[in-house]
Image (cartoon, rainbow, N blue to C red):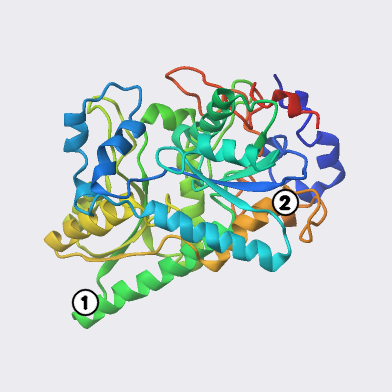
Amino acid sequence: MSASAVPDAVPDAVADAVPDAVPNAVTDRGRMKPKDYDGILLASFGGPEGQEDVIPFLRNVTRGRGIPDERLEEVSHHYRANGGISPINAQNRALKAALEAELASRGISLPVLWGNRNWDPYIKETLQQAYDGGHRRLLMVTTSAYSSYSSCRQYREDIGIALTETGLDGKLEVDKVRQYFDHPGFVEPFIEGTGASLAKVRSELTAAGELDAAVHILFATHSIPTRDAEASGRSADEPRDFGTEPFPAGSAYVAQHLASAQKIIDKVAPEADWSLVYQSRSGAPHVPWLEPDINDAIGDLAAKGVKGVVVVPLGFVSDHMEVVWDLDTEAKETCAELGVVFDRAPTPATHAKFVSGLVDLVSERTRTNPDKGTLTIENRPAMTKLGPWYDVCRPGCCANFRGEKPTIAGADSTVNANFVNR
């Protein structure tokens, strides 16, 4: 199916009539017309909230891979060390409350529902409760900003599967906002935090008599299998070049991080040395994942004489386990062992600009609310040439190599198909 065959995408004629609304002709073809929603679904990964939850949670995360509990126990140490509690659920409760307050302040009457992929409250139960409570059309906001299988398509699959299993396909409509890796509401908190962390590291080095010491900025994100990275943002019928000057990259996942990182550097310290690094690798050792690992990178930098690093958790919305363990514990310890000054910039979490930006993403998709303006680029801001990203993912985008599953919010989706013309 071609992009132009999707009835619910904004026609090219509309884009042509409003030239300012076409910063990226390819992604603009995946725009969905605004609708009248009756609720917002905040969807996230989920995490354990006690020691007894750890193994059941990890079973959910690795479902279908045949990993025995003994192996799961071996990899549970970071949860065990934190009392079996992941910070992510508390972070999402705070974000839900902040979104509700921001919506109320703008006069937007949309309730915020919350569902997780891997722990209570589960997406499936949340959708059933939404339908039972009278909801018929939800707009999903995920706590993941980038394009890849695990950070986008898997959320679309989870909704598709849940609607199918509950029998709500055709009864409850669920769309999603675009990936927001370069939305000002996501990037600007990082600009603010990176500047503050850089100043702190330089201050500590100056106090130690290292006035001219080299400092490096590391933008950290979750590693994913190389095969998934190469498929990210790809489409069966729309070949894409994701190169962003001066960083040619064939992966949307990599290109999106590089492009947003460059915007942060341009604002904070244009002459600074920086690089994109990866963390939280899992899976079989023989399967290639994105590199370099952050700890290896720190070791290489120290060997070259770098005395301070600023770690920017660019791939993360909030301080969940991959941040508080892999960065605040392991990467910090690596720096301490090598005599490198370390500081970690904050995640957006409930930063006012981030919360406001998420509501902006909702507003640009809602047909009638007090915030709604006309269809122009100003209502779909993007800080890089890669955006604004798709509302409707392209056919085969971010493929699932384990097999096709029912999905929503895609040009080739079968779930919710009877809502396409509404």
Which residue corresponds to the image point at 49% horizontal and 32% vertical from the top-left?
A: 154
Q: Position of residue 211 (x, y in %)?
A: 25, 78
Displayed quadrant of residue 110? bottom right
Dot 1: what SS?
loop
Three-letter code for the amino acid on which mark 1 is drawn: Glu
Look at mark 2 in the image and give the residue it sits on: 364
Q: Is residue 259 above or below residue 173?
A: below
Judge the density around disc 1: few (<14), some (14-19), many (≥20) Cα neighbours within 10 Å.
Answer: some
Rate crowding at label 2 as few (under 14), some (14 to 19) or many (20 or more) other CA atoms within 10 Å: many
Q: Is residue 219 above or below residue 286?
A: below
Mark 1 vs mark 2: in front: 2
Q: Amino acid at mark 2?
A: Glu
Question: Can see residue 211?
Answer: no
| In the rendered image, the vertical position of residue 266 relative to residue 225, given as above or below | below
| Nearer to the camera, 174 or 186 | 174
Tell me the residue at 29%/52% (across/down).
85
Q: Nearer the viewer, residue 43 or 145?
A: 43
In this picture, residue 304 sits left or right of residue 61 = left
Q: Earlier in the sequence, mark 1 or mark 2?
A: 1
Label annotation for residue 27: none
Report the quarter where the N terminus lies. top right
Residue 4: give x, y in percent of width and height: 76, 26
Q: Write the residue at 52% across / 34% down.
A: 124
Q: CA distance from mark 1 to mark 2?
A: 49 Å
Looking at the rendered structure, which numbered label has been put on residue 210? 1
On the rendered structure, is 34 left or right of 314? Answer: right
Residue 40 placement, left or right of 334:
right
Task: Residue 168: tell me if it is visible.
Answer: yes
- Residue 233 is situated, as x and y percent measured from the top left of the image, at 54, 33
